Amino acid sequence: MQASADIFHALLAYKKSAMLRTGIELGVFARLAERPATADEVARDLELAPRGSRLLLNALVAIDVLEETDGVYRLAPLAAETLDPNRDGYLGELSRILTSRWEWEAMGRLPEAVRRGGPVIAENAEQLDYGYYEEFATHAGAVTRPTVARMTGTVHDWAAQRERLNILDLACGHGMYGLTLAQQHPHARLWSVDSAKVLEIAQKNAARLGVADRMQTIAGDMFTLDLGGPYDLALITNVLHHHTPERATELMRRVAAVTRPGGKLVLVGITADDGPVRESPEAHLFSLLMLVWTDNGEAHSAGSYERMLSAAGYRDMRLYRQDEIPMRVIVAERA
């Protein structure tokens, strides 16, 4: 019976995702973080239909993110820690990424993608102007802080000792990796590459962090653009899983050609282990998203990255893990 219950709850998971995103989007958790309230009070304050308010609140009680006593609803401890916008552990922004309409639409057609071996929707991640990238750049910055801290820490001492620190940030997105390095190292200068619309978001973050005067932007396709250079440090974050190892190696070679000998390349992304599938489940789940979003992408393994880096002219690869986060940081040196 337990096996049946486990499968039953797995099949219900998309409903729970929809409920949580709805509660975040409508402001239910923010409202109850202020003070407990009845369903009618929540409906009045958030301009919801009373029936809709009552049914949503009861459903959220059913999955243990709210508590209810005598018709009064309050945040359960789990929600108080993670869904109160005023708390440091707030995960609401992450819902805009993990339950984006782009992911939902694509994963809803997973059977077709499995039959085809690739995406079945016209708009997908291999397009430079894919709308998801703007949403990711807008909402993912806050939840990448642990990975940004891990990445910047791996090169901090090396970067601090450099007389010059010119940084190339490819597929920069929100820009927080390169921008944080620039903030930490006053002698750093940053060249950020992405689509024009995404770069507008990165520029706003640069202004907020006080480093806009040391940031230049290069809009366009990183596989064909003149990347400038030479650079001392290059970043490629959250993008190589869109491509085959051969295509990723091609990009690394392009970067190596504009990086000074002894310079560093930093890769950030969801990375599979080289052992059994169960040792890196997040990576293999993520690869299904790459199936519906790209023609040939998937989460590459650590061993695959080592081979790619060697073929592209890098050496001394070092992989850094993070507790409870499936993102890996890889650092290598330009030979």
Image (cartoon, rainbow, N blue to C red):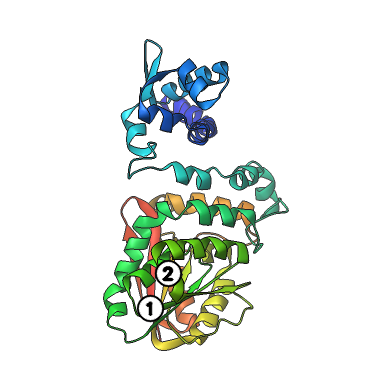
Q: Residues within 10 Å of mark 2 (few under 14, many from 20)?
A: many
Q: Secondary structure at mark 2?
A: helix
Residue 183 lies, in percent from the top left, at: 35, 69
Mark number displayed over residue 188: 1
Q: CA distance from mark 1 to mark 2?
A: 10 Å
> Looking at the picture, how far across and down is residue 27, in whole percent?
48, 32
Q: Residue at x 42, y 61 (%)?
A: 208
Residue depicted at x 48% and y 87%:
230
Q: Residue, x 73% and y 53% (percent of image)?
A: 122
Image: 140 above or below 181:
above
At 37% from the left and 56% from the top, the residue drawn is 145
Compared across the picture, whether 208 is left or right of 157 comes to right
Dot 1 or dot 2: first in sequence order is 2
Q: Contact (CB < 8 A) between labels 1 and 2?
A: no
Q: Position of residue 149 (x, y in %)?
A: 33, 62
Q: Quadrant of the N terminus?
A: top left
Q: In front: 196, or 131?
A: 196
Task: Report which quarter residue 104 is drawn in.
Answer: top right
| Foreground of the two, 9 or 188 | 188
Q: Amino acid at mark 1?
A: Ala
Report the disc number at residue 178. Answer: 2
Mark 1, other Cα within 10 Å: few <14 / some 14–19 / many ≥20: many
Q: What is the secondary structure assignment of the residue under circle 1?
A: strand
**Which of labels 1 and 2 is toward the front?**
1
Counting every numbered tag in the picture gives: 2
Q: Residue type at mark 2?
A: Gly
